[in-house]
Image: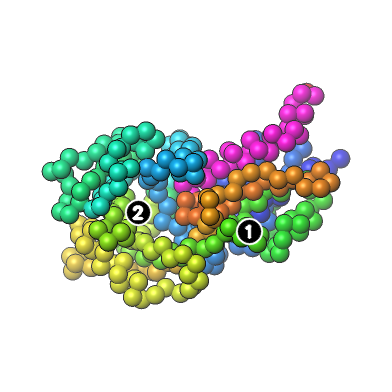
Amino acid sequence: MGKEAVVVIGAGVIGLSTALLLHESLPERFGITIVARELPGDESVDYATPWSGAHYRPIPDASPQGLREDSLAKKTYDHFKSYAKSNPDAGIRFMRGMDLLESPSQEYLKTVGHYADIDDFRVLSARELPYEVKWGATYTTWCANTPVYIEHLMRKFILKGGRIIRKSLENLDQAFTVKDNVRTVINCSGIGFDDPLCFIIRGQTCIVANEANETITRQNSDGTWTFVIPRPLHEGTIIGKTKEVRDQEASPRPETRQKLLEAGARAFPELLDANGKFRVIRDIVGRRPSRTGGIRLEAEVLENGRRVIHAYGAGGRGVEMSRGIAEAVLELFKSGGDVQQEKAML
């Protein structure tokens, strides 16, 4: 009897992380196949992961959605602590993180609970704060070179025996036809299939050659945010960001680049070269797959014994939550009964 095929839709960081974990964790009678329109190395504006300036910073959001996302991000953080050491080629590096806020909310000022639960967290004293900054904190966090990281995940998945099919799917039903004996589909499609709660957020950033050794996020008095995120393995530094809801423009806007660089120069003058400039490598535009209410992470039972496990709509936090999401998908898969039944028979 052939293997039972499990199809993972999508080869972004969530799809690749999930497929690899399933392949490493499930019994050999399951075969894992990724079906995706884009793969690592592609530069589609809708392929969000490689455009990401990925780092982890704690967010003091005590809403149910915020707490759920924080739990998934913390699991990823814990996983990366060991993974970065054992896989130095993966493009993940731990370093100092810093938040500098000109107009902090009460949630930040409380600095209690899950928000402060990160390695080496410390609130800065007033004398340590830059001009106009009202509150700040430092902590140990990670930054990821996302193109390198997803190439690493794909290579590892293939070397372990995983299969990849490049194919554009029009609907979920098609995923059950790409292989024989498919009973479970993992929907890591990013934006979902006609989910009315899904929408895109356009993000524009800029990669510069100026080297940074820490990641800093600054909230400006006008409510905008400016960050610097190093790309490990000496592949530049990302200056950002914009957050433009439902903006479909695929090309970088020159005026946006200028605003980003001007804000970056004001916030991080120590990064400028001898001429007081950023040395621009390229502009980045990506469409982040977002969803009202946050990520959809649940199992759905279909007819004829089939099921779909949904894991999409992570917005701009896909890399931050990726391993936590993969672990949640694995638990949802096991809760379907197939794996427990097999273990009971052994």
Residue 35: x and y in percent read 68, 56
Residue 250, placed above or below residue 131 = below
Left or right: residue 29 compared with residue 297: right
Dominant SS in magenta: helix
Q: Is residue 260 visible?
A: yes
Observer-nearest residue: 171 or 9? 171
Q: Quadrant of the N terminus?
A: top right
Q: Residue at x 39, y 69 (%)?
A: 282
Residue marked by disc 2: 230
Query: Judging from the image, what secondary structure is the residue with disc 2 in?
Result: strand
Observer-nearest residue: 170 or 66? 66
Badge count: 2
Q: Residues within 10 Å of mark 2 (few under 14, many from 20)?
A: many
Specify the label residue 154 is tagged with: none
Q: Quadrant of the C terminus?
A: top right
Left or right: residue 117 compared with residue 68: left
Distance from disc 2 to disc 1, alpha carbons, whole Å, reads 34 Å
Quarter-of-image position of residue 168 = bottom right
Q: Residue at x 65, y 51 (%)?
A: 187
**Furthest-right residue in view?**
1
Residue marked by disc 1: 195
Which stretch appears magenta? 319-345
Residue 32: x and y in percent read 70, 46
Q: Residue at x 33, y 75 (%)?
A: 255
Give the image's coloring scheme. Answer: rainbow
Left or right: residue 143 compared with residue 160: left
Observer-nearest residue: 222 or 122? 222
Quarter-of-image position of residue 198 = bottom right
For badge 1, the amino acid type reads: Asp
Residue 100: x and y in percent read 25, 49
